[in-house]
């Protein structure tokens, strides 16, 4: 019985390789200013009327409405540093950034969950949501506690893995295919963690499963997005503080 994600082995090595030592492509430069504000690309200039804050680490747009400036800077720099983990000013993998830009993906951030209004977002912009109220600077990263977490880590990682990593490396990290004979290495490992190949949420997960997400609105691709977040953060000991609370969904 697998009770720890680290026992899954093969994907763990590949995830660490991507997020720690993948530095072969370094063609897209950026800096990490205390004032990351910038004007949005012309095709989304109309969004400025509703989203007064914008930044674009490595050309990936982040739009914010009703966000305190310190939280906005935090989110911008988090995206930049996830794309440039060694902070040498160059994206660790330009292929990932390129896919995010080709698909016109980024972050769209409202103040609260109740204030989210999708009508304000341009139809051509594929934005991952994040709210200011769930972005908590005091308990981000290693400062997380059992009752306080910074949701910016998860949501920003989602857009990178789903719109960048999965598309740049479909055989290894792809999320779109559902046929068990065609799925990516990541999806194969997810099936192991879930205890089987389920396109939706099963009536009950096998007792051997360590990943048992039960959101009925989350399809197989969505399950992959959530899985790789759990896997990466667990490999970096990022879930230790909330291990007990996480056990409903994740037991590694």
Image: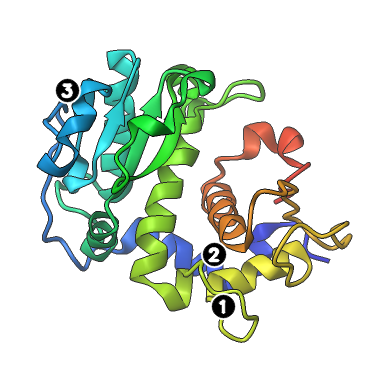
Point out the frontmost of discs 2 and 3: 3
Mark 2: few/some/many CA within 10 Å (<14, 14-19, 20+): many
Name the quarter where the N terminus is drawn. Answer: bottom right
Tell me: 90 left or right of 204. Answer: left
Q: Secondary structure at mark 1?
A: loop
Residue 141 appears in the figure: no
What whole-number distance in Å separates the C-alpha atoms at marks 2 and 3?
34 Å
Of pointers 1 and 3, the one earlier in the residue sequence: 3
What whole-number distance in Å separates the C-alpha atoms at marks 1 and 2?
17 Å
Q: Which of the 4 image quadrants contains residue 41?
A: top left
Task: Provide the residue designation for mark 3.
Answer: 34
Q: Which of the 4 image quadrants contains residue 167?
A: bottom left
Point out the frontmost of discs 1 and 3: 1
Task: Provide the residue designation for mark 2.
Answer: 12
Who's the residue at 30% across and 23% down the image?
72
Task: Provide the residue designation for mark 1.
Answer: 183
Q: Secondary structure at mark 3?
A: loop
């Amino acid at each position: 019985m697998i009770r720890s994600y680290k026992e899954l082995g093969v994907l763990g090595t590949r995830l660490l390789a991507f997020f720690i030592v993948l530095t072969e492509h370094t063609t897209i430069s950026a800096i990490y200013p205390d004032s990351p504000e910038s004007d949005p690309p012309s095709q989304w200039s109309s969004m400025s009327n509703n989203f007064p804050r914008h930044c674009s680490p490595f050309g990936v747009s982040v739009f914010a409405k009703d966000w305190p400036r310190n939280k906005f800077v935090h989110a911008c720099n988090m995206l930049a540093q996830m794309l440039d983990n060694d902070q040498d000013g160059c994206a660790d993998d330009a292929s990932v950034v390129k896919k995010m830009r080709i698909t016109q993906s980024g972050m769209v951030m409202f103040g609260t969950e109740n204030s989210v209004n999708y009508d304000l977002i341009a139809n051509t912009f594929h934005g991952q949501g994040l709210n200011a109220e769930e972005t908590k600077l005091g308990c981000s990263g290693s400062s997380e506690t059992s009752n306080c977490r910074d949701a910016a880590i998860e949501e920003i990682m989602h857009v990178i893995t789903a719109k960048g990593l999965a598309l740049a490396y479909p055989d290894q990290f792809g999320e779109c295919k559902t046929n068990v004979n065609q799925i990516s290495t990541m999806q194969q490992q997810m099936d192991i963690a879930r205890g089987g190949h389920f396109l939706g949420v099963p009536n009950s997960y096998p007792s051997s499963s360590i990943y048992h997400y039960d959101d009925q609105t989350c399809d197989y691709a969505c399950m992959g997005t959530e899985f790789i977040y759990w896997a990466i953060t667990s490999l970096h000991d990022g879930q230790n503080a909330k291990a007990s609370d996480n056990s409903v969904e994740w037991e590694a």
